[in-house]
Image (cartoon, rainbow, N blue to C red):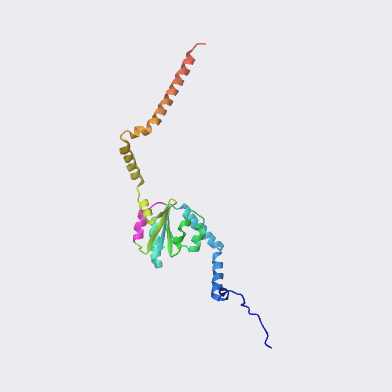
Amino acid sequence: MMPFYLSPNKDKKLEELCHKAINATKKKERGEIANPYQRIIAREVRNWFDNSKLIAICHQNSMTMEEVFELRVSLKKANMFYKQYSRKIMKLALNNSPYTATLPLYNASHGVVFGSDINVTDFQKILKKFPQVILLAGILEGQLLSKNDFLRYGKMDLTTSRMHLIQLLQNAGGNNLNQQLTYHQSTLVARLKQIGTNETTSGENEESVPV
């Protein structure tokens, strides 16, 4: 009589019987757990984001190591730094932060430029020399901007813009706009001076009255 053995695969799902699926699941579980070194790098990335006035998120096509080095040197001369991190590091650094909205931009090969100054003009000049690097979006002083808004805002001359605004307001309100804006302030100053003069005069009169 033949012995009867229960099948070890009884009631198992198909994916449980596939060794590739099992190995892929284990690999994914291991990948989701960040090690201490990755957490240190993630803190470094977050520090770059929090303390940079200019952040340019770029897609990088195929480049040689020499080309990447030349890009880094050119940016360094303009006080900018080109950094590359894995998607896992970016997710670890930016998840649940003001920069979470940028996470989809790191799916493919990417690089991030950090600058301590808003120097978009020099950044754009450097980027023209490296067509393999394509600007996707940017952050200026904590504000997330599209590519076009990033370039437009970076080129703005704030002093000239203020002058144009003042001129526009003057044209809209007439030549007496400045007087209208400062009327209450001037009136208050004059009234305070008058009160101060009256109090001084009153004090002098009291001292001159004989006892």
Question: With respect to residue 20, does 4 lie above or below?
Answer: below
Give 181 or 4, whichever is nearer the viewer: 4
Residue located 40% across and 26% down the image? 190
Q: Quadrant of residue 175?
A: top left
Check the picture and name the quadrant holding the N terminus.
bottom right
Q: Position of residue 82 (x, y in %)?
A: 42, 60
Instruction: Write down the region rendered in magenta.
Output: 117-128
Question: With respect to residue 193, does 99 lie above or below?
Answer: below
Q: Quadrant of residue 10?
A: bottom right
Q: How many marks?
A: 0
Residue ranking furthest to the top: 210
Residue ranking furthest to the right: 1
Q: Position of residue 39 (x, y in %)?
A: 54, 60
Give 96 or 117, whichever is nearer the viewer: 96
Residue located 47% across and 52% down the image? 51
Question: With respect to residue 189, does 44 lie above or below?
Answer: below
Q: Position of residue 101 (x, y in %)?
A: 46, 56
User: Mostly what secondary structure, the magenta segment?
Assistant: helix
Question: With respect to residue 183, does 18 lie above or below?
Answer: below
Whether 12 is among the magenta residues is no
Q: Position of residue 26 (x, y in %)?
A: 56, 70
Residue ranking furthest to the bottom: 1
Whether 124 is among the magenta residues is yes
